[in-house]
Each structure stands twice: as structure tokens, then as C-alpha cells.
Amino acid sequence: MTKEEAKKRIEKLRNELREANYKYYVLAQPDMSDYEFDKKLEELQKLEQAFPEFYDPNSPTQRVGGEPTTEFKTVKHKYPMLSLEKSYNIQDLKDWINRISKLVDEKFTFCVELKYDGVSLSNQYIDKKLVQSLTRGDGIYGDDVTANARTIRTLPLILRGDDVPHEVFVRGEVMISRENFERINKEQEEAGLPTYMNARNLAAGTLKLLDPKIVAQRNLDFIAYFMLGEQLPVDNQCDALKKLEEWGFFVPHDYIKAKNLDQIMDFILDWGVKRFDFPYDTDGIVVKVNEFDIQKKLGYTAKSPRWAMAYKFPAERKLTKLLGVDFQVGRTGKVTPVANLAPVKLAGTIVKRATLHNEDNMKKLDLHEGDYVYVEKAGEVIPQVVGVDKSKRKPGAKPIQFIDHCPVCNTPLVKQGADYFCVNTTTCEPQIKAQIEHFVSRKAMDIEGLGPETIDLLFKEGLIHNVADLYQLKVDDLKDLERLGEKSAQNIIKSIQKSKNQSFDRVLYGLGIRHVGATAAKILAHHFKNIDNLMQASVDEITKIKGIGPKIAESIKNYFSNPQNQALINKLKQAGLKFSEDEESQAVDNKLENKKFVVSGSFKHFSRDALKESIEKHGGKVVSSVSKNTDYLLAGEKPGPSKVSKAQSLNIPIISEDDYLKMIS
């Protein structure tokens, strides 16, 4: 085959595959069999390999995913991606309509659409070709996920039609259908892996995976809902949705043009019921001023467009039978009651279990065996029991009591506040496994390769009984275990050994002492310098430290009073972990004493963590958000725009990295 013949054949195959893809994924009207599609795709791949000079990033072959990337670039949006003002009742919508009606003299209409519960994505097309896909990020800057976006079948790589502007931005939502979500979770279950909480989180996590090949396997979808650019071929939102479909985007037809609140209400009432039969998760509706020229006149606030509002559906409530109550033990020993339910479809997923929170809530509900209970999703995510239909209760049904002993190790429970705790922190299996998961986490010892499944496996094999046992593991202990192997075993052992270099405050945080978070651990490490001083300190001594309250102090004293915890510390010392503060970690001087800094952006001479450590070494304090009590906003390249804006409004000095270096020199 000559080069010219190959070029013609490649173009022909690409056009045929693009058309087949559009008809299958967008129109749901396939006209090519899977076998024929696969054969043509295989032929195209071979031709592109034989003639690499005809490479095209928008070829159908690129949808299968390219090579893994090491990180995502941060890119500034040409048009900021602002969030929508939200309402939870009709009065808010009515007030919004009255408010914007006073701002313009002309009559206008509304485009009313479904609010998709997915991940926002902005796609730039130049001369019809996809150039770049950015996540929302902070609205000003987003992550470049173009390689992953190319794997989405319902996102066209080349636009159809003759009226596409030279440059156009198409925004929409990355989604996973309920059917696909259930398939993925079933595969997770069969593989003995944790299932995903909801489709939105799975879509968000998938879009940020570093390996496009894995992204391609998840079958993400893209639903388009907005276009931006100069010289658009339409002048209103409803026509824009029609045009997006003509260009090859997946646009559900579930939107209307409305003239008034009554018509908007009809849509809300209709979809309040129909949304559960829709193949994708929706959590409300979006009302936009339809006419683009009126949108332009209304403009924007600092956070959102004035011409649009999101109305959130109230949480769905379902009645189902209570089959029983289990009691789960967490890392800190907290015991949480969980209701086992007759399966019920709730907000698009099948719910079989729901939290009961604590004993007080159980008493308030007055639960009895065999009750019929009302279930909602807290924040549209976590199922919870919110009521009981007592009219369905059978005579003689026994009330369900909170347990008084640990369901795993049978240790008597201790009530603290509203919650009960198992105080057996050394042999209670779920506590120990959760403690190990905490110990190896990124903010603590940062040991790679030890996920919950691997920890569970090591525990079942009797290889570990506490965190100190990790440092006794060898490659030979791991290499023949299920789902591991020589290479994985070597990587795990290497990461465990590397963790011995973690600083004292991270080791202290990793111990999992109740109420001692990463910040408290850092304060304690700086104050006491080593673990022995901390172990010998009284509650009064610990409480006097700024930032450490009596609850933390009591918890620390209780932890170190336990002989088994003392033995664990000794084992970790023998393993070589750092239980004293390095000289370089200690305060250098007090040049920044009592000064509060907010750090934002990226820097030339420091990583973000190193810069925060530097501030603390010089006596300063790092806080997360700008307030009137902030002394400086230390801004690097691409700082958070909201932080800059707030600092300016409060007249807080914004300093550069060079300014900071002068302050500490």
C-alpha cells in the first residue's frame, strides 16, 4: 500500500468509525455491528502504526487510552467556571425571578434543565477539533485531563456541522450511568474489593486517574449543557442545546422553554418523580435566563452568574422493613448501630443498610423488631433511618436495645458523651486493622501498597497484629500471598523501610491517639521534643499548651497509661522510628512569633509543605483560610483567587516568596 492509499484508507476508516460512534452513543441508533466496528478499529490501528506520519490525537483509536501521565497540569480557564446560586425551596426561586426582573427592562424567558450530579468539564475546540479538557478546579484554574477526556465515547473529538465557530468551549457534566455504576460495584464485590459510595464520586475519581487505559474501561459519559465563545451560531440557551446535539454531543431532550414560575414549577413537580427512572443521577433542576443578551446584561457576582439558579430536590424518603441491627466498631473503638433493611431503591441506588448514628437516636426512633422504617440519604450520599411507621408495628414486637459489650471482642462498652466505645484497643480486630490503615496513610507514615484489602490479608495470615509488626515483615513473607508477587512485595517492604525517616510529629499522628490530629501532633512534637517527655507529662502540663485542650490532654494520658501501648512504643523505637524532633525540625528563631500566615499558590524555592514548616520554625503559624485575624497572605504563582480577593477586601498584606525570605533572613 502506498502512502497516498494509506492516507485515504485511514481517513475513510476514521470517518466511518466516528459516524458509528455518534449513532451508537449519542443517538442510540447503531447501524454497525460490534464485530464490524472492532475489525475496522483494528485495521485503523495497524495502519496508524505502519504510517505514524498520519497520527491524529482525535483519531477513534485514541479513545482506548494512551500512556499513563505523572501529573495533571493546572491551566487557567479562558472563561471562569463559576458555581450556581442554589435554592432549596420555591420561594427562593420566586425571589430570584423578582430580583432579576428589576435589573432589566426587556421581557425574557427561561430554559429549564435537569441538574446532573456529576463532574463539571470544560472542553475547548479549535477548528472543530478537541484541543483541551479542563476540570472546574477553583473556577479560575482547572486540571488538564484531556488524555482522559478523549476516552469518553459521548464526547466528540471532532465536531459535526458547518456552523462551528473557529473556537468554542463546550461545558457539561462527566457522568457514570446507574447501570454502569452497579456493574462496576458488582465487579468490585466479586474481586473482594471495596465498593464505591456513589456514581458522582466514582466519576470524579476516574477522571483524575493517571492511566487513561483504566479511565477508558470505566465507560464515562459526557452530557453537554452550555457553549461559550465569540460569534456563536445561536442567541439563546434552548437553541444552544439543540445546536450542541447537532454538533455531535449527547444532550438529553429533558429541558423546556418556560415563560413564568408556574411552568418552571410544572417541570420541577414532573421531574421530582421521573428523575429516578432517568439513567443518570440528578439532584435538582437548573433555571437559566434563556436569552444570551439578557444574560450578558445581568452579568455575574463574585461567585456565580446572576442569570441562573439551581433548585435542589428534597431528599427522597422510602419506607422499608427493618431486618435487624448490627453494631460496627471503628478505629477509635466507637460503636455505631447500622440497620439491615429489606432492599429498597433510594435516589437511584439499592439500599440494604443505613446508619442509626447512636443510642440516643435509636431511643428517639423507638425501634422495635420487624418495624417499617423511613430511610433518606444524608446529603444525597449516606443512607440513614429517619423515622418509623408505628401503624405497621406488630403487637408484642420487642424493642431493640443498644448493646453493652463489644460485638467483636466482648469487652464491656464505655459511654462517652452520646457514643459508646470499646476500650480494648490492643486485641479488638476491627480497631487494630483500622489503626494500621491510619498508621500507613499519607499524612502519617505514607506507606504505599498497604490498602485495606492487603492489611486484611496480612492480618488473616497472622503476619501482623499491630503497627509494629509491619517493621518485621520480609519480602519472603509477602511474595506468595494472593494478589501480590515478588515485585509488589519488594515495593511494600521498601516503602515500610522508607517510612522510618518520617518526622516525629507524623509518627505521633500515626499512633492514632484519639482526638490527636495532624496539627495537634505537630504542636505536641514541637513542645515536648521527644516521646518520653510527652509520656511523662501531666494532664495539666499538656492542657497549658496553646492549641491543646483538656479533651486531647486526657486522651493522651489515657493512651500512654496503657501498658500495651507503652510496649508498642518500645517496639517501634527498636524498629528505628523517630520519636524525637530532629534539630532541623526545631524552631530556628522567633522572627515570626504570633504571626498568622495563609499560604496559597506554588513556589520556586519551597514546596508548600516545606514553606509551612519554615514558617513554624520561625515561630509563625499557618492557617487555612483568610480572616480578619490573618497577618499575611503568602502568595506564590497561581494563588487561589478567592483568598486573594478576601485578603484585599480585609486589607491584609499579600506578600511574595521573596518578601518572605527577607522577613526570615
Image: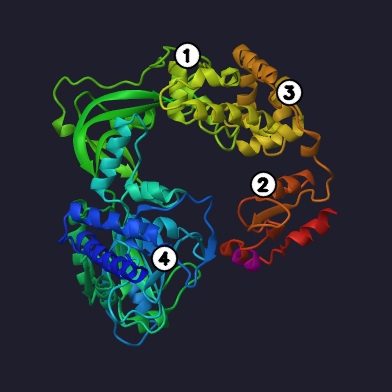
Residue at 20 percent across and 66 percent down: it is: 253
Q: Which residue is mark 1?
A: 462
Mark closest to the chain's N terminus, 2 or 1: 1
Mark closest to the chain's N terminus, 1 or 4: 4
Compared to 553, does 170 lie above or below?
below
Badge 1 density bin: few <14, some 14–19, many ≥20, Cα 10 Å: few
Residue 494 image point, x, y percent: 60, 29
Mark closest to the chain's N terminus, 3 or 1: 1
Nearer the observer, 413 or 23: 23
Residue at 27 percent across and 77 percent down: it is: 161
Type of amino acid under label 4: Ser
Q: Quadrant of the C terminus?
A: bottom right
Q: Determine which quarter of the picture holds residue 642.
A: bottom right
Residue 186 image point, x, y percent: 27, 36
Q: Secondary structure at mark 3?
A: loop
Cα gap from disc 4 to disc 3, whole angstroms: 55 Å
Badge 3 density bin: few <14, some 14–19, many ≥20, Cα 10 Å: some
Type of amino acid under label 1: Gly
In the picture, the disc for residue 609 is 2
Compared to 596, does 496 lie above or below?
above
Q: Which residue is mark 4?
A: 122
Residue 373 image point, x, y percent: 22, 34
Q: Which residue is mark 3?
A: 537
Residue 133 image point, x, y percent: 43, 63
The reply to whether residue 152 is in sight is no
Mark closest to the chain's N terminus, 4 or 3: 4
Q: Quadrant of the N terminus?
A: bottom left
Cβ atoms under marks 1 and 4 closer than 8 Å:
no
Nearer the observer, 149 or 12: 12
